[in-house]
Image: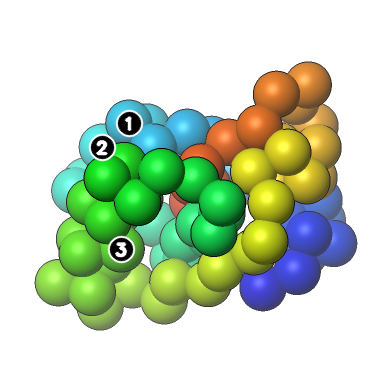
Amino acid sequence: MSYEKVAQVKPRLIIGTKQTLKAMKSGMVSEVIIADDADQHITSKVSRLAKDLQIPCSHVESMKKLGNACGIDVGTAAVAIKR
């Protein structure tokens, strides 16, 4: 997963760990992107649920760059792409 792909699907993004988890549980997510420099305590919940629900999970290096790709001024640990 690249930052460019995230930027291309902006209208279908769910930004943030809590919102991502909620959307995953609702069955609204086709793919999840996690920042590697985020706190593992937070991102482990997302990756575990993605594995349990068989949702593809990609990783990027930076929370800040992921936030920028989403069009926000702060970093984000996790982003989901809606179906």
Residue 17 on image: x %, y %: 39, 37
- Secondary structure, mark 1, is helix
Q: What residue type is labelled 1?
A: Lys
- Secondary structure, mark 3, is helix
30 or 52: which is nearer to us? 52
Q: Do the residues labelled 2 and 1 touch (CB within 8 Å)?
A: yes
Between the residue at mark 2 and the residue at mark 3, the CA separation in whole angstroms equals 13 Å
Q: Mark 1 points at which residue?
A: 18
- Secondary structure, mark 2, is helix
Q: Is residue 25 above or below residue 19?
A: below
Q: Name the residue under label 2.
A: 22
27 or 80: which is nearer to us? 80
Q: Name the residue under label 3.
A: 47
Left or right of 39 in this view: 75 = right
51 or 60: which is nearer to us? 60
Q: What residue type is labelled 3?
A: Ser
Left or right of 50 in this view: 76 = right
Query: What residue is at 31 percent from the left and 42 percent from the top?
Result: 42
Precedes in sequence: disc 3 or disc 1: 1
